């Protein structure tokens, strides 16, 4: 039982890293080429699915209960996304303000 909980905590921590990586990729694409953000969404989903598959395989390798590790992994990816989404919205608002300022400058 103790090892299952340790596995869940480790999967949770690694899930936070996956969520952070997804955020960084989205942020960079949003800043550089916002029109490509829909493609990044697919890439992020593939990354998350691969992480869940790796957690499932590792839980079998280390003879852990897969439910504990998968729940830890899912919570680790999901809970930080509330924070990361809020940060992405701030980045998007900053870009919108810059673009509206450019349009005002062009109009005179």
Image (cartoon, helix red, strand yellow):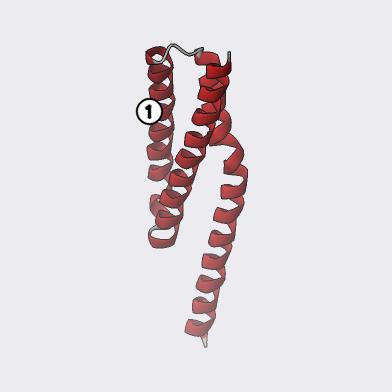
Q: Is residue 11 above or below residue 29?
A: above
Q: Is residue 1 above or below residue 48?
A: above
Tell which of 99 and 23 is nearer to you: 23
Give the image quarter of residue 94. bottom right
What residue is disc 1 on?
A: 50
Tell which of 37 and 45 is nearer to you: 45
Q: Can you give x and y, in whole percent of width and height, for residue 95 in the image?
A: 51, 66
Give the image quarter of residue 60. top left
Q: Can you give x and y, in whole percent of width and height, for residue 30 in the image?
A: 44, 56
Instruction: Count neighbours of disc 1 (C-alpha within 10 A) and say few if under 14, some if 14 to 19, many if 20 or more.
Output: few
Q: Can you give x and y, in whole percent of width and height, for residue 74 in the image?
A: 54, 28
**82 sits to left or right of 15:** right
Q: Quadrant of the N terminus?
A: top right
Q: Residue at x 56, y 49 (%)?
A: 84
Q: Is residue 18 above or below residue 37?
A: above
**31 sits to left or right of 13:** left
Q: Secondary structure at mark 1?
A: helix
Q: Residue at x 39, y 34 (%)?
A: 47
């Amino acid at each position: 039982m103790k090892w299952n909980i340790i596995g869940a905590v480790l999967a949770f921590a690694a899930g936070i890293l996956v969520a952070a990586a997804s955020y960084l990729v989205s942020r960079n694409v949003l800043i550089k080429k916002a029109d490509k953000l829909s493609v990044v969404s697919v890439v992020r989903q593939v990354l998350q699915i691969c992480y869940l598959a790796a957690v499932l395989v590792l839980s079998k390798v280390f003879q852990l209960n897969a439910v504990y590790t998968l729940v830890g992994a899912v919570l680790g990816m999901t809970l930080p996304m509330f924070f990361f989404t809020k940060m992405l919205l701030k980045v998007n608002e900053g870009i919108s303000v810059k673009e509206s300022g450019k349009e005002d400058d062009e109009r005179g």
